[in-house]
Image (tube, helix red, strand yellow):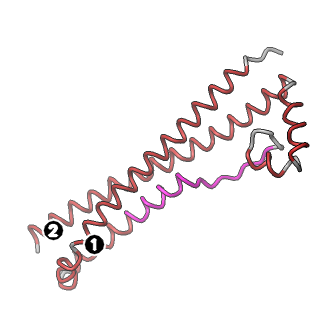
Amino acid sequence: MYYQNSDNFWNQLNRLETLIKGAEVKAGILFSFHSFIIGLFINKLAIYSELFKENIPLFLLVICWIIIVAISVYYCFSCFIPRMELKYDDNVFFYKDAIKAYGNLENYKKKMLEICNNEEDLHNQLSEQIHVESKIVNTKFESVKKSITYFGISLIFVVLILVYIMFLS
C-alpha cells in the first residue's frame, strides 16, 4: 500500500493548528467588540435609565439587544471550548491518551516508539489526529460564524436604539 511521506501529515496538522488559532483570534476580537459596546452602554446607563422607565418600546429594544449580545458571546465562548463527542481508539498523539491510556511514562514511550517505527500505524494514528483536529476546526469556525451573525444583528439593534433615542423619544 502506498503512503505519503509523514511530513505531509505533520504539515496538515500544523495547518489545522493555525486554523484553530485563527478561529480563536476571531472569537476574541468579537468578544472585545462586545465588551467595548457593552462598556459604552453601561457607562451611559444612568442617563438612559429614565428613558427606559418611560418608554416601553425602547426598553424592549434594549432587552432584545441584550439577548442577541448574550447569544453572540455564547458562541464566542463555545469557540474556545467546543463540545464534541468523539470516539476513537487510543492514539499516542491524543493528549488525554498520552496521559491516561498507556499507564506510566515507560509504557507510553514503548507504544510511541512502536507506532513511530511502523509507517502504517504511524500514518493511521496521524490520520486520526488530522480527523479530530478537522472536526475541531469546523466546530470552531461554525461558532465564529454564528457569533459574527449575532454580532451583526446586535449592531442593527444598537442603530435602532440610537435612532429611537435621537428621533422618536
Of all residues, the one furthest to the left in this rendering is 167
On screen, residue 16 versus residue 146, left or right, reads right
On screen, residue 22 versus residue 117, left or right, reads left
Residue plotted at (57% across, 47% down): 139
Q: Position of residue 124 (x, y in %)?
A: 79, 30
User: Label 1 is placed on what type of residue?
Assistant: Ile
| Residue 118 lies in quadrant | top right
| Residue 166 lies in quadrant | bottom left
Residue plotted at (48% across, 40% down): 22
Q: Nearer the viewer, residue 3 or 103?
A: 103
- Mark 2, residues whose alpha carbon is within 10 Å: few (<14), some, or many (≥20)? some
The part of the chain drawn in magenta is: 69-88
Above/below status of 14 relative to 164: above
Q: Position of residue 72 (x, y in %)?
A: 42, 58
Q: Is residue 66 magenta?
A: no
SS category of the residue bearing label 1: helix
Q: Nearer the viewer, residue 21 or 162?
A: 21
Of all residues, the one furthest to the top in this rendering is 2
On screen, residue 82 versus residue 163, left or right, reads right
User: Label 2 is placed on what type of residue?
Assistant: Tyr
Q: Tell me the CA gap for discs 2 and 1.
A: 18 Å
> Of the residues under marks 2 and 1, which one precedes in the sequence?
1
- Mark 1, residues whose alpha carbon is within 10 Å: few (<14), some, or many (≥20)? few
Overall secondary structure of the magenta stretch? helix
Q: Nearer the viewer, residue 98 or 76?
A: 98
Above/below status of 16 relative to 26: above
Q: Tag on residue 164?
A: 2
Q: Which residue is mark 1?
A: 42
Q: Are marks 2 and 1 in contact (CB under 8 Å)?
A: no
